[in-house]
Image: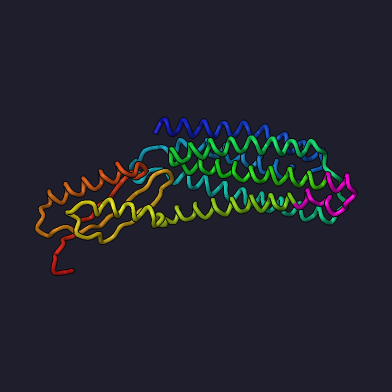
Amino acid sequence: MEMRETLAKKVAWISVISNIILTVGKIVIGWYGNSDAVFADGIHSAADVFASIIVLLVIKIANKPADKEHPYGHGKAEVIVSGIIGILLFFVAIYVVYEGISGFFHEVESPSLLAMWVALFSYATKVMLYRSSLKVAKQNKSKAIEAIAFDHKADIVASIAAAIGVLISIAGNRFDIHFLLYGDKAASIFVAYLIFKIAKEMLTEAFDILLERNIDTETLQEYIAAVKAFEEVKRIDRIRARELGHYVLVDLRISIDHFKTIKQGHDLAKLIKQRLMDKFDNIQEVLIHLNPYFAEDE
């Protein structure tokens, strides 16, 4: 838990520092370089700074062990953070769309070439941050770090789209093709769409976990196969599993021969629980209910 928390904090701090630098650069250059797309990308980076700070504040809570008041642990704290970031990105998308559309009703000037270089620098930086953050998120099964990685992912495409928009506008000015001057405005709307798409994915996943939706069918089938490997299990009556941030809780009802003793049933349940937790390292708890099995019931 301590190592997981340390890694999460490290990823969040790297994200905060890099996003502060990118935010200042993109907003300043976007504003003075006359690029709505780069400026919008800067607003998105500002949202990333806020998101990373929230993650830093909640990581310690999410990694606390279960206690009397929270017997299932504190993992959902990470999911709540992921939802908050999703809501934040949703409002950022609305703002960027508004600014982009309103730009079509005014005369526009060509953005500076510097704006394009800033967008390309942001793209290269975000690719590195996305890959490293996603790797840590998968290794530690952290929804909070995964949320940061998704933020970087949105910035990757947003930055390259902003660079292309700036380039189109500059080309329109150089070759005197008026409608191409609006390339930067169009790029800012595309950036908003990308931000909205990421926000939707994050909010959908957060709501699914908070509403305790069953885990995906493929993973559930892997659990079932692991349980059926025990010959003593005559039937799986019910199996459910739910995510609580970075860990999973499994509820299992199985039928075993009715003549088995309580101790035999207990020992079998203990072996099944250990097998599941050994094979799937994100399973934190397995609750097993035993039912009597009668061959004539089949």
Q: Which residues are magenta?
A: 170-186
Please say if 215 is above or below 277. Answer: below
**In the image, 69: left or right of 77?**
left
Instruction: Residue lying at the far front in this picture: please name it.
Output: 175
Q: Which residue corresponds to the image point at 50% horizontal and 42% vertical from the top-left?
A: 144
The answer to if 47 sits in the magenta stretch is no
**In the image, 277: left or right of 100?**
left
Please say if 281 is above or below 182. Answer: above
Q: How many marks?
A: 0
Instruction: Tell me residue 98's x, y (percent).
Output: 74, 54
* Quadrant housing the N terminus: top left
Viewer-nearest residue: 120 or 281: 120
Instruction: Tell me residue 48's x, y (percent).
Output: 62, 40
Instruction: Tell me residue 261's x, y (percent).
Output: 10, 53
Q: Main secondary structure of the magenta part?
A: helix
Instruction: Tell me residue 136's x, y (percent).
Output: 48, 36
* Quadrant housing the C terminus: bottom left
**In the image, 168: left or right of 19?**
right
